[in-house]
Image (cartoon, rainbow, N blue to C red):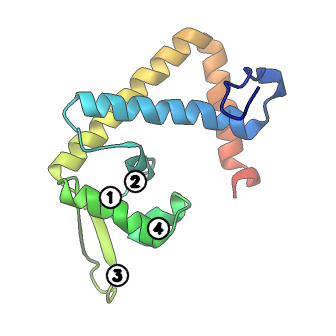
Amino acid sequence: MTFFDEKPPVKTKDMLIGAMLRVPSEAIHRRIIRELNAAGFKELGLPHMAVFRFPGPDGERPGVIAERACMSKQAMNRILGSLEDSGYLVRSDAPDEGRARIVHFTRRGQAAWAKAYDVLRDIEREWSAELGAKDFAQLKRLLGKVWESSLVK
C-alpha cells in the first residue's frame, strides 16, 4: 500500500472524540453549502461556513467572528470581503468605537442565513428519524452538557 492508495476504513470504536465530532460537522457544512448553492446562493462555499455558523455574524466585529472560527483576522477579513462583494453582508463603522467595524447581513445574507437554518432543521429531523427520537434527544442532551461545561472553555 502506497501513500496514495485508499486507506482502510476506520472502525468507529477506534475513533477519538475529535474525529467523531468533526466528521458529522463537516458533513453538515457540506450539506448546507450544497443546498444553499441549489437555492441560488451559488457564490457560497465551505470557507464561508466560518461566517455562516451559530450564533451568526450580524452585529459583530470581524475580530470576534475570526476568534469564533479560530482563524486570523486577516483570513476572516478576506472571507468577509468575498461575502461583501457577493452582496451577503456589509461592514460599517461601529458607533462610538473609533476605527472598529461591524458586520451586518444584507437582505440576501438574511435569506441565506434563513435557508441555512431551514437546512439544519431538516438535518435534525432526518437524524432523529435515523437514530430514533429517544437517541437523538439523548445526543442533543449530552452535547448540551458538553457545551455548558468547562470542557469547551
For the point 32% across and 89% down, the residue is: 98
The CA distance from mark 2 to mark 1 is 10 Å
Query: Residue 13: image x %, image y %?
Result: 82, 22
Quick one: SS at disc 3?
loop
Say which of 117 and 77 sits in front.
77
Q: Is residue 52 above or below residue 75?
A: above
Amino acid at the residue labelled 3 = Ala
Q: Residues within 10 Å of mark 2 (few under 14, many from 20)?
A: many
Amino acid at the residue labelled 4 = Val
Q: Residues within 10 Å of mark 1 (few under 14, many from 20)?
A: some
| Comes first in the chain, label 1 or label 4 | 1
For the point 41% across and 43% down, the residue is: 46
Q: Which residue is mark 4?
A: 64
Q: Which residue is mark 2?
A: 51
Q: Which residue is mark 3?
A: 100
| Comes first in the chain, label 2 or label 4 | 2
Left or right of 7? Residue 53 is left
Q: Is residue 60 visible?
A: no
Q: Which residue is mark 1?
A: 58
For the point 32% across and 58% down, the residue is: 58
Query: Residue 106: image x %, image y %?
Result: 18, 54
The CA distance from mark 2 to mark 3 is 18 Å
The CA distance from mark 1 to mark 3 is 15 Å
Q: Is residue 67 above or below residue 5?
A: below
Amino acid at the residue labelled 2 = Val
| Comes first in the chain, label 2 or label 3 | 2
| Comes first in the chain, label 1 or label 3 | 1
| Comes first in the chain, label 2 or label 1 | 2
Say which of 87 and 149 sits in front.
87
Quadrant for the C terminus, please.
bottom right
| Comes first in the chain, label 4 or label 3 | 4
